[in-house]
Image: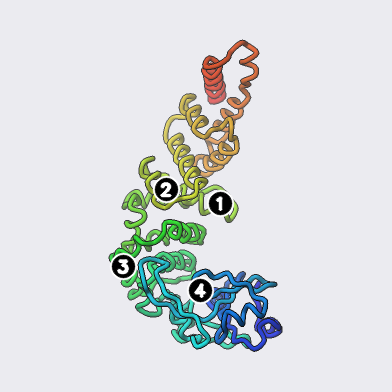
Amino acid sequence: MEKSGTETRADSRLAGLKVYRVGGAVRDALLGCPVYDNDWVVVGATPDDMRKRGFKPVGRDFPVFLHPETAEEYALARTERKSGHGYAGFEVHASPDVTLEEDLLRRDLTINAIAESSEGALTDPFDGRGDIEQRVLRHISSAFSEDPLRVLRTARFLARYASLGFTIAPETLALMREVSHSGELEHLAAERVWVETEKALGEPSPEVYFTTLKRCDALAIWWPELKEELLKQGLVAMAKTPDAGASAVSHWRYAQLVSPLSDEQREALAERLKLPNAVSQLARHAALTHKLLDSALSGPNVLFWLERLDSWRKPAQVEEQLALVNVLAPEQVRRLDSAWQSARKVSPQALIAEGYQGAALGEALRERRGQAVAAALA
């Protein structure tokens, strides 16, 4: 929940500290969007000051503390200097002499560099409010290019706010293109790339993330398989996903995005991004379902589909794919569900009772399941 200035002043742990709400909470409040999480910056304090007040240190690379009651993050004002490649290649300077303006200067976009005092006064040295009114994503300084992850973050913000009329400033898009050509994107950790991509896939306009990365020549670096027609097909497919909870929608959208790729391309992309197993598996299964629907729903094809889904041991995976079928080809759901229900009723115990065992049991089980599927489809 959004914390008001009154509540901030009333917190005895913060008495005497210069505390400002910063970043997304301020941005979204100005946009009239719901504010769920607050981030705070503390100016003029030391780590020892924070610990004495009961704050719990969690920052590994720079001083960040959790409030012992609200668990919100309080970071000491800091500056950063580029010292290496990639997202983590920075030297951080945090001390009581770092000003609020210096802390805001290190941020990526003007709309993310607005601070709010406990009294509600805004500090906006880069006219982020003006860019919010003009619906523009604009970088603060040339230091934007020092962190290649900002290319992905900016594309993700556009995926979030494109429906509100936001665009990327031409000079910022040009800088994003420079970063893409510099080779810096290649130094990002795959896990960081996936974190940003997974978040973007959950935004209101996820397709904008990928088209923006293509516009600034970043797509070819981490997603070279998504070329031209395959990207177009993937974005069309991505718009059709089963109803799912917030945590699952990103994974379904990814699975649909890569459904036009070949098996080899899909696995290469999964390996490059170091995808979680659950995401890679969902993508494989969705591709299987697409192939099934693109072919005749014959007994052998449906049986192969069920076997590849490991249906007998993991029936939930079939139900998951039937939900996709209901989106892609609703007229086929009843037939496939009937075939599945018939096949799963074939009892290994009944065949054992008939005298089958060993390899013969496996062959008979597959044959009977195939017959059950064919009968149900007919």
Which residue is located at x 38 percent, y 67 percent?
A: 148
Q: Would you name the residue on which mark 2 appears? A: 270
Q: First in sequence, mark 1 or 4: give its number.
A: 4
Q: First in sequence, mark 1 or 3: give its number.
A: 3
Q: Name, please, the residue furthest toward the left.
A: 181
Q: Would you name the residue on which mark 4 appears? A: 62
Q: Would you name the residue on which mark 1 appears? A: 248
Q: First in sequence, mark 3 or 2: give its number.
A: 3
Q: Amino acid under label 3?
A: Arg
Q: CA distance from mark 2 to mark 4?
A: 32 Å
Query: 203 and 124: which one is in front?
Result: 124
Q: CA distance from mark 1 to mark 4?
A: 32 Å
Q: Looking at the image, is 43 positioned above or below residue 353? A: below
Question: In the drawing, does residue 152 fall left or right of residue 67?
Answer: left
Q: First in sequence, mark 4 or 3: give its number.
A: 4
Q: Residues within 10 Å of mark 2 (few under 14, many from 20)?
A: many
Q: CA distance from mark 2 to mark 1?
A: 17 Å
Q: Are marks 2 and 4 in contact (CB under 8 Å)?
A: no
